[in-house]
Every structure is written in structure tokens, then in C-alpha cells.
Amino acid sequence: MSHIQVNAIEKSFADTKVLQGVQLDIRGGEFLTLVGPSGCGKSTLLRIIAGLERQTSGDVVIAGRNVNGVRASERDLAMVFQSYALYPHLTVRDNMMTPLRLRDLSKAQRTPLVGRYLPGSKKKLAGIRETVEETADILKIRELLARKPGQLSGGQRQRAALGRAMVRRPVAFLMDEPLSNLDAALRVHMRAELTDLHRRLQATFVYVTHDQAEALTMSSRVAVMMDGRILQLDTPMAVYADPVSRRVAEFIGSPKINILPGRLDSAGRVTVLGHSMARRITDAAAQSVSVGIRPEHLIDVPTDSDAAEYVGVVRRLEHLGSDLYIHASLSDGQEMLIIRSDPDAAARYSYGDPITIAQVKGAALIFDDKGDRLRTAPKKESAGDDALEVA
Amino acid sequence: MNRIHYLGESWKHLILILGSMIVILPFYVMVSFSLKSPGQIERNEGGFFGTENSMVDERCVKLREPDRNAIAAARDRFEGLDDTQIYRALLAEIETDCSMHPIVYNYSKAFSEAPLLRYLMNGVIVTVSIFVIQVIVALPCAYALAKLRFRGRGFVFGMVIFCLLIPVHAIALPLYIMLAKVGLTNTYAALIIPWTISVFGIFLMRQFFMTVPDDLIDAARMDGMSEFWIVWKVMLPTAIPALLAFAIFSVVAHWNDYFWPRIVVTGNRDLFTPPLGLREFKGDADGSFFGPMMATATIIVMPLIVAFLLAQRRFIEGITLSGMK
């Protein structure tokens, strides 16, 4: 367990800058997730930490040691790949033994055929075997040790790949979308197992994914990456509830956050679709803004309700069992809103029905025209007529 | 609708059957000749297997033809006969001695007329050496071309493709001169060295390595393998099907090669490869030896056919390559 520092890492492939000065401090023992759309540079960053790729500039420091010129195998990290990357011609046991063999046996002892008879090999091999079996027990794959990867299911391969990473007791585990090749149910299950494993091993996990659900469910901290930069690094809840920019807000959360065009006047008042919001923006110039509202912060209300803010027409109902998402187009025909509702609401609506929508107060996120978050002033108590205004 | 469909199908089969007949016919003739007596071969009769149960080896008779001494020595056995009659009687005895089943004749001649076993062994030495060295050269090359990033990689690969276009016969003469200058003609080295770098092998293996996921190589690097060991411990085992396909191409080409051994092996019969051995049966003053010649040919192709049948599935896998993943 040890912390990893990434200092001002830049990486260019030919003319394209993939990473633009990434700064990251990974604490020992934490589960840090790098999340972002494909092509944002998250995998490249992970490969640079691993030593599989060389950065154009910047430093990687692992446990206080600058590892810029150190080979991947000597950084004492283990990596789990999306395709599992198990050696197809070796049994699971041999797959798991490989990293230990390479680390613990001398060159002479690794010589095919004769190596195992050299002094010392037998004892070391026995030790390696034992480690492999212990690890297999933790992952519950002992009965698979004699099989080859071709005879395993996706989940079993995943476990074998984890086992191969674990046997070395590395400083940190690097995982590059390890669950992407699994089916949905198994992915959810493996999420729990990985979290469990992290708790048990108390090791540093650096996890790359494009799936925000994985990022939110497993991590201690999430780094949202876009265009070669880390936009926000915080706990999953903070990233979700308090995004620093519109892009982060749009990337995290499913279904996507609703974005409505608004107008900010010089007094700091935000008007969206004819409604002014209660909260004021502190020190900002008048400009057009976008207002983000998460689907769970919109409520469908009876037409005659006082709280009614938006009026729209139901375009699509998305029934997820526990939740119902109503897609509605607003009366101006331009904007679409997604509203989370309880499944019973399905009985009330069908395609083309009118719907009135209210918004949970204080939940809207406001972004300026460049997409940066605008902070609202803390709401004053009994602010007179302002309090009557919605939102 | 269905009838039209079948008609279309049967056309395909008809064409394939015709094609396969053209391919199989020479083999049919080869095997058939190796089973028949010279007389039946010349008269073109006896079907596939030949109908004679025994034939007289005329050469054997010629060599043992009774001379004056033999007749004198045999006078005691044939009392009361004159010399001409004794001569005839002796000749009859010799003919019975020299007669045998055509198959036995052809195949025993194949081994006795020329040191065929030696030729077969030469063939094995040459083809196996060529293949092993080709693999030793091609795998690292293909790995570098497929998986390593370096300046000029595209150019180097372009040169590999370009070399595929050069026919062997075009460079045979310069190659021969070079070998002759260093005094290597009439050696195994002359038979092997020109073939050790197979651009086809590099190309084939490179195409295969392109399909191996990069993750596998990265995983090996993380595990601490050097690039050298990645080639032999990770790439080689995953490339077995492609290597088998290449092995068949390589071994067949060099086992059957007549052109190059004929050029560099001029005098020393100990270095003859099997196809050169066939020349021993070419017709001369004694008449032709089609039977034994075809028997030799059958023996030479047999190892290849057996190997192909054993590896047939893998072979097709290797050629299509796409079926791998």
C-alpha cells in the first residue's frame, strides 16, 4: 500500500495531445477511478503509470520513488486488462505462477527443462505454488487451476486475471476496464466483489472505466477526465451532486442531467423558461447560462398545482421496474426533459398526454456560457417576496 | 426455385470435380505405374493395379546370362543335352530366379538402384533445418513489425512485401555465384542458407501477430518478461496454427524442390535430395525404368501426404486465419 503521484504528465501521439498536464495524487489504499468518455486519455494515463507507455513530459512517483526510467515489471504494480490477457496456452495455475516465476527465480532457474533441478528452485517453486493456491482460495477459483483460459467463462477468466495480478502482492492494482467484457448481471456482481476485494486487501486500486455506474459504486474517489485533463477529483457523491462544470454534470448521472437555457441578469437572478429562480448568483456578469436539473429533482404534479413550473407533452415512458422515467417535450417544442417518477405514474400517462412539472427547490445547477459552474449565494432566511418564487 | 438452386450448386461441384481430377490424375498415373510391370506400362494395359502376378527382370537376366564356363560347369547336371539346350535350360532357371511380382520389383528397385534412404534423410535434414531457421528469423521480425513502434517500420514492412514479389529463379544465378565464391557449393549449407530468411514467413506471421491483442503483450511486460521471451514464450505458443500452415508451405516447397538442389549439388550424390534421386531412373541405353521411378516418386510424396492428412484441419485453420478468434 503506497501512494502514487502523477505530476504534470503530458503525452502526445504525433500531433495530437492526449494528456495535457495531468496532476493526480493517489492516496495509499484508496480506490481511485478514472472515468471519462472514450478517447479522453484515461487508459493512456493508466498505461503511463504502469510503465507501458512513456510520457512526453512529467513525472510518475510511486511510494516516493521517481519511476520515469523504470521498466513496467520493476514498478511493482499489477495490471488487469479488459481482455483479461491470460496466456491462452497455459493453465490458470501457470498463468498465475508466471509473474512470480519471473520475479523470484533466477535466469538459470528459469531455463526450460533443466532449470527446475538447479539448487534452490524446488523450494522457490513450492513457495510460488503455495502463494498461487492461497490466492486461488481467496478468489474461489481453486478448482479452475488446472484449466486453460479457453475453457473458462468470462467471469472465471476475470477472476483468473485478478489472481495473476494479486499473487505478486503489488504496491497498487491498475485495472483497465476490467468489467467491460462481462454481461450486465455479472458486471454488477463483480462490482461488489471488487469492492470486497479492495476492502480485504487494503491495497491501492486505480481503476479506469467509461461506465459512470462503476465509478460511482466502487470508488473512494473519482477523477473525471475529458480531453486529456482531469476536470474534477472528488468522492463519487460530490462529483454527482456538486459538479464543477456542465460537462462533468452531463457525463455523470444516468439518465443524463436535463439542461435548459437560461438568462442571468446583472442582479444575479437566473431566469429559465420564464421562471426566475430564488437563489442568486454571486458576482457574475449578465450572460446566457445553462441550468442543469437532474431527473430526480423534477416532479410531475397535478395541472392545478401551485408548484407547476413547466408544461410539456409526454413523448416516451421508460419503465425500469423500480423507477419510471418520463421523457417530455416542453411546450416550446425545443427542450426535452427527463423526469424520474414512481412506477405507478405509468398508469397516469401515455404518449401525447400533457404533463405539468415542478422542480425540487435548490437543486438546480447553473453553468455559465463556457460551461463552468456558477455558485449561488447561500439562501437567506425570510427573504421576503423572493421566498414566494419557485425554485 | 429449388431446382434452379440445385442446378447452381451442381455446376459448382462439376467444376470442382473437374479441377480435382486434373490435380489427381498425375498422382493416379504415378501410383498405378509403381504397381505395374514395365511391359504393361508400355502397352498401357492392366488397369490401375496391373494384372501380372510375376514378371521377369530382364536386366537381372542379362547380367546373369550363362557364358561358356557356366555351360561347361552345368554339363554334369544336364546329361545328354547339347550346349544350346543346356544354355536354354540354364536361362530358364535364371528367368525363374529373376521373376517377381511387379510391385516388389518396382519398390525394391527404388531402394536398390539408388541410395533412396540417404536421399530421404538428406531431404529431412535440409527441410527441417530450413524450417527451424526460418522460424528463428521470422518470429522476431514479425513480432517487431506487428507490435513494436519504431521509425521506419512501414518502410521495412514495405520492403518485406516487395521481396515477396521477387521470383527465386531471378536471383538464382547471383546466389549461386555468391555460394560458389565462398566455396559452399556441394554442401548442405548451399541447400539451406539461401532459404533461411523467408519473407513469406515474416509476412504470414506478421499478419497473424496483428490479431494477437496488445493486452497480452502488455500483460507479459507487466509480469516481467523481456521482449525476447515474449516472442518465444507468448507469441510462439499462440501462433502454433499459423506456424503449422507455414510449416506446410515451407516443407512442401523445399522437400519437392528440384531446381535449387540441381544447381548447387553438382557431383556429390551423398547430398542428393529426394527429387534429385528421381533422376537416377531417367531412361538411358538400358531402356526406361518407369516402374521404379514412379515407386520412388510415390515414396517421396508419401511423408507429405501423411503429414497433410494429419494436420489437415490445422492447415485450413492456418490459411484462413480468420477462424482463429
Image (cartoon, coloured by chain):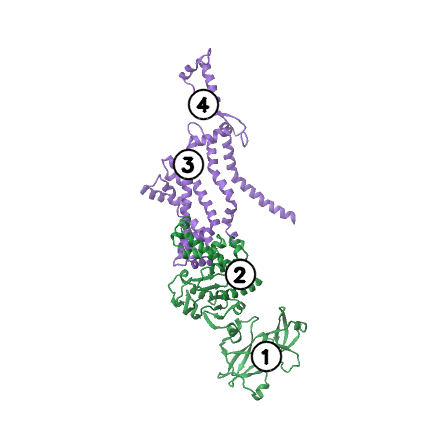
Chain colours: A green, B purple
Residue position for label 4: B61
- The answer to whether residue B213 is visible is no
Give whichever of discs 1 and 2 has the lower sequence position.
Answer: 2
* Helix, strand or loop at mark 4: helix
Q: Amino acid at mark 2?
A: Asn
Q: Which residue is under mark 3?
A: B119
- Residue B84 is drawn in which quadrant? top left
Circle 4 crowding by C-alpha within 10 Å: few under 14, some 14–19, many from 20: some
Q: Amino acid at mark 4?
A: Val
Q: Secondary structure at mark 2?
A: loop
Q: Are discs 1 and 2 both within one chain?
A: yes
Kindly identify the amino acid type of the residue bearing the numbered disc 1.
Val
In-front residue for pair B299/B258: B299
Q: Circle 3: is it few (<14), some (14-19), or many (20+) Cα within 10 Å?
A: many
Q: Residue at x 60, y 47 (%)?
A: B8
B238 and A275: which is toward the camera: B238
The amino acid pointed to by label 3 is Tyr
- A329 to B50, vertically: above or below: below
Of marks 3 and 4, which one's residue comes earlier in the chain?
A: 4
Nearer to us of marks 3 and 2 is: 2
Same chain shared by disc 1 and disc 4: no
